[in-house]
Structure formats: C-alpha cells, structure tokens
Image: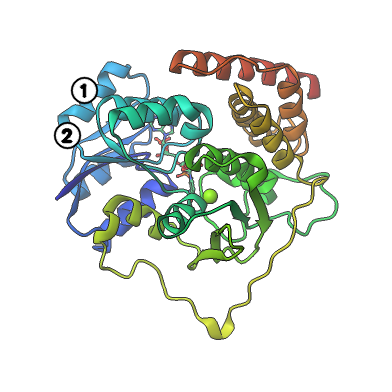
Amino acid sequence: MKRLLVLGATGSIGTTCLNAFRSSLMGDTVIAGLIAFNDSAIYALGTEFSVPVFLSENKTEEDIRAFISSVSPDIALNGVSGIAGLRYSDLLIDMGIDIALANKESVVLGGRYLLGKADRMGISIIPVDSEHSAIWHLLKGHKAERLIITASGGPFRDRKDMSGITVDEALNHPTWKMGRKITIDSATLANKALEVIEASYLFSFPPENIAVTVHKESIIHSMIESPDGAVYALLSVPDMTLPIVSAITGEQSQAKLVRPLDFSSLSLTFEDWDRKRFPMLGLGYRALKLGRSYPIAFAAADEMAVDAFLSGRIGFMDIPKVTEKVLDAGWHTEPSSLEIILEMADKAGIKAEEAICSFT
Ligand code: NDP
Ligand code: MG
C-alpha cells in the first residue's frame, strides 16, 4: 500500500487525481492528506476521503513540514501552480518523499540544483506533465538522440491577427481543461517553452536536440527519435488521468485509465510553430541556451506578465515583450542553491513589474 499526499488538491491536476480515486483507478494507493492554498473546498474533500487537510496561506515552512510528517506519505503529487511549487518539491526531497511532478516550474527553476539533490537523496521524480510522462515511458524502452515535444497550438493556432486578444479568448483552450496560468501559457506557447526547458533538465538533452511540433489533435503526447532514425510515440486521448495515475501507481495499474482510441476516425496532423506570432517559445529556447539563471528569469517574468494580462493591466502580446525585456537584463548567476534561485526569481519579478508599468 502506498500513501499519497496531494498538493494542489483543489486545482485541475488535484481534481483529476481525486476523480481517479473516485473511479477506483488507483490500485492499492490511499490518500494520506490534501494540501491547497486558501480554497475552503478542501474541507469537503477531507470529509469525503476521510483524510487530514491543510491550507498553506499564511503558514510557515515549519507548519507545512509538520503537517506533511503527520500524514507520513510515501509519495506526493505536486499539483501546485506556478513558482510556489518549487518550495514544496524542495521540501519533499528534504523529507525523503518521492514526487509525482506536475509542477513544471519546480524543474525549470530548480534545474540541476533540484534534480541533483533528489539524486543524492535517492528520491524519484516522476514526470506528470503529459509530454514528459510520454518521453519518460518511451525512454525506458529505447535510446534517443532527439526529443520531439508536441504542442496543441492553443486557441490562437490559426489566428492571423494577434492584436486585441481578450482574457476570455485566451482562457478558451481547444483540447485541455486546466488552471488559468497554464491555459494562458498554452495560448502564448510559453507552456511549450517551459516544457522544453523541463525536458532538457529532466532527460539531459541539449536544446538543439529538442524539437517542438504543433499537433492540434493532442493525441500524440510526445516522441523520441532513436539514433537509427526510428521515431517512437505515445498516443492516447487527451486526459491527464493517464500520466497522473501511472506516475503514482507505477506499473501496478490494471485499470483502463483512458478511453481507447478509435482508429477508424483518427487523423493526426503536424505543423511547424510560427516564430512571429508565438515569440515566447523562441524566448524560452534562448533562455535555455544561455543557461545559468536565464530559465529562472524567463519563468518568473512570464508568471508576472500572465498575472498582469489576467488582471487587464497589459495586452496578450505584451507578455513576450515583458519577458524579453527581463531576459535582456542579463542573468549570469549560477543557480546553485534554493536561496539563489528564489532571489533570482524575485529579481526577475521586480524587473518584470518595471516592464509592465512601462506598458501601462
Ligand atoms: P490550478 O490553478 O487549477 O490549481 C492550482 C492548485 O495549486 C490549487 O489547488 C491551489 O490551491 C494550489 N496552490 C497554489 N498556490 C499554492 C501554494 N502556495 N501552496 C499550496 N497550494 C497552492 O493549476 P493546475 O492544476 O492546472 O496546474 C498545477 C501545476 O500542474 C502547474 O504547474 C501546471 O503547469 C502543471 N500542469 C497542469 C496540467 C493540467 O492539465 N492542469 C497539465 C500539465 C502540467 P487553491 O485552490 O487553494 O488556490
Ligand atoms: Mg504539458
């Protein structure tokens, strides 16, 4: 029996995970506890699953640590949104708890520091992001020279004029139902940029060996190319149940996790991404190539800019402008500790706020 702690239990990832328990897809895994930020819906979830719950708003790291140790989990699903997720991943590693990781920001910011520490502590970090989950499964069976990450292209894949995009339009994702931050990131392709960085760190691939292809059906979750030129892909209907449950239960899942594909009506298309309409992906590659604290600055600037867009302070196409201004400031510090990483993220946030003010 495995005891699971769910972080971000009230969010999209958390809800999909709890629905998998409701549908008895979790094998012999049991819920140990639930954590969210300030959503009181957590209390009803605690009652439903008969487990302790915790809201982290205004709580200290000591309080969080005490709650986690009181429920003694074997594994935690990190479904916290944004940069806030990094502190939890770091804490879980310190506490010797394996992580099913949805929070991509943990890897983008934490990078070699976080993964190196997990390695030294013997902690497994199993990716939940659907593209990385696919690659992780594919790499078990094959050597790869190149990773090909698929992107749905978001709601503006076919939109010619990118001016005047509203928040409602940007929140209307064609294939995935997710939290607000990642949905806006999917519309700008910043999400794909974060995923390229995440893949580079998780699987030790240089940026030039990671390609992105727009695949609007979101059926192929990613591909790997072997040295002999063969390409392996993982296919399923777009449903986060598969990567979440398989990351948590490992090989033990006997249940059918997703509806089977109907090949009689399946068509799969691919196209290149448009560098002009989606500058965030190019900026993400630039940050990854420059290394050091550039990926941190990219993620922190994007997070601030998305927030400013959602609250009506800047336009949709200002998000890449803010991010570019922040990257131009130069981020040469080696992110060798959590303190330095968080300091760089704070600095990038301040620079982003300056840029946002200059656009408003
Ligand atoms: P949501 O916005 O739907 O949910 C976020 C969850 O995190 C909520 O439960 C929220 O609690 C909680 N949370 C936020 N800040 C804190 C904090 N400081 N401490 C504790 N809990 C906190 O996000 P998603 O579920 O969409 O995404 C979560 C993560 O998973 C992101 O990193 C995203 O990139 C990644 N991901 C998501 C996918 C998806 O399909 N949604 C797919 C792949 C990756 P509260 O409700 O109380 O505010
Ligand atoms: Mg993804």
- State which tag comes first along the sequence, 2 or 1: 1
The percent coordinates of residue 56 (x first, y second) are 34, 26
- Judge from the rendering whether residue 113 lies leftward or rightward of residue 310; answer left or right: left
Question: Residue at image x 58%, y 83%?
Answer: 265
Which disc number belongs to residue 66? 1
Outermost bottom residue: 264
**Dot 1 alpha-carbon crowd within 10 angstroms: few under 14, some 14 to 19, many 20 or more:** few
Which disc number belongs to residue 97? none
**Residue with the mark numbered 2:** 72
Quarter location, residue 271: bottom right
Question: Residue at image x 75%, y 28%?
Answer: 324
Quarter location, residue 26: bottom left
- Judge from the rendering whether residue 330 lies leftward or rightward of residue 342; answer left or right: right
- Judge from the rendering whether residue 90 lies leftward or rightward of residue 295; answer left or right: left
SS for dot 1: helix
Q: Quadrant of the C terminus?
A: top right
- Nearest the camera: 266 or 168? 266
The percent coordinates of residue 302 (x first, y second) are 64, 31
**Amino acid at the residue labelled 1:** Ala
Q: How many angstroms separate mark 2 from mark 1 (CA)?
A: 10 Å
- Please, is residue 97 above or below residue 264 in the view? above
- Please, is residue 277 above or below residue 287 in the view? below
**Amino acid at the residue labelled 2:** Ser
Question: Residue at image x 42%, y 60%?
Answer: 141
Question: Residue at image x 58%, y 38%?
Answer: 197
Outermost front residue: 228
* CB of mark 1 near ligand 1 (< 8 Å): no
Look at discs 2 and 1 and give the one toward the viewer.
2
**Dot 2 alpha-carbon crowd within 10 angstroms: few under 14, some 14 to 19, many 20 or more:** some
- Please, is residue 158 above or below residue 15 in the view? below
Task: Decide if residue 154 is in sight here.
Answer: no
Quarter location, residue 154: bottom right
